[in-house]
Amino acid sequence: MKKLPILTFVAFIATASFGQTSTLEQAVNEGLTLLDSARTIQDVQSVVNRFQRIAMAEPARWEPLYHQAYSQITLSFWEQDGNTKDKILDEAESAIEKALELKGDISELHALQAFLYQGRIQVNASRGMTYSMKAKEILEQAMRENTDNPRAFFLMAQNIYYTPEGFGGGCANALPVFMAARERFEKEQGKMGCGPKWGAKTNARLIEQCNNEK
């Protein structure tokens, strides 16, 4: 008879934990949907604010910090002022560091760091060589850490795509890596949870663009 209340309590805790996870997943997915449909810089800033609030409400979870950083990097591409871009990227870098401290998915976080480096290039073209190499090095690391990470392959392909042909870049060299990313994105279809899911659409668009340039 004494066991019944204990079992009931355990069942309650399990149900409460599941409910909390479902709520977090819903909040993250709603934020990503809003980011995908953003049409103005104000729309993107609103998503950044949303993920910052989620990260504050879930301090033990790395995923909200990841999505906060991802949305901030995205925001930097909308911003026109170079100094403001750098400040936004500084905040994103801090979020990535916190997510790493929480033992988040290291391959995904290293790939996101590479995306941030690519964002640094847009502030000043003279940074191209330095940050392109930084992105390449950390993407190679991310690909070793998880050979099935589609974002690591996609961002590597993008890095190659925007590198001048004389330095081993361009469509011809990027396309095989875009194709490798597509294979991994296809395996990821229907992925559940709060983790990263982005990149497939842009990867598909750049494959089409490369094919048109042949």
Image: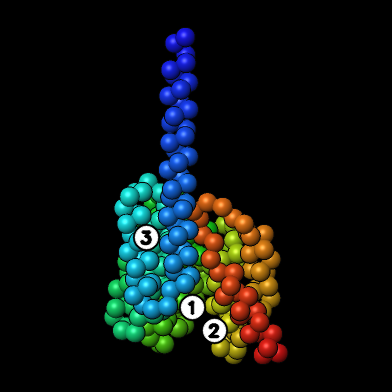
Do we see residue 16 in this rendering?
yes
> Nearer the N terminus, badge 1 or badge 2?
1
| Label 3 – label 1 distance at C-alpha | 28 Å
Disc sitting over residue 105 in the figure: none
| For the residues bearing labels 3 and 2, Cβ distance under 8 angstroms | no
Left-right relation of 91 to 118? left
Question: What residue sits 38% from the left and 66% below the top?
Answer: 47
**Residue behind mark 2:** 162
Residue 145 spot, x, y in % from top left: 57, 57
Please state which amino acid type lies under the numbered disc 3.
Phe
Which quadrant of the view contains residue 75? bottom left
Disc sitting over residue 132 in the figure: 1
Residue 94 spot, x, y in % from top left: 34, 62
Question: What residue sits 45% from the left and 60% below the top?
Answer: 30
> Nearer the N terminus, badge 3 or badge 2?
3
Mark 1 vs mark 2, foreground winner is: 2
Please state which amino acid type lies under the numbered disc 2.
Tyr
Which quadrant would the C terminus be assigned to in this image? bottom right
Residue 23 spot, x, y in % from top left: 43, 48
> Nearer the N terminus, badge 3 or badge 1?
3
Disc sitting over residue 51 in the figure: 3
Q: Callout 3: few (<14), some (14-19), or many (20+) C-alpha neighbours within 10 Å?
A: many
Q: Nearer the viewer, residue 3 or 122?
A: 3
| Label 1 – label 2 distance at C-alpha | 9 Å
Mark 3 vs mark 2, foreground winner is: 3
Spot the residue most to the top: 1
| For the residues bearing labels 1 and 2, Cβ distance under 8 angstroms | yes
Question: What residue sits 47% from the left and 9% below the top?
Answer: 1
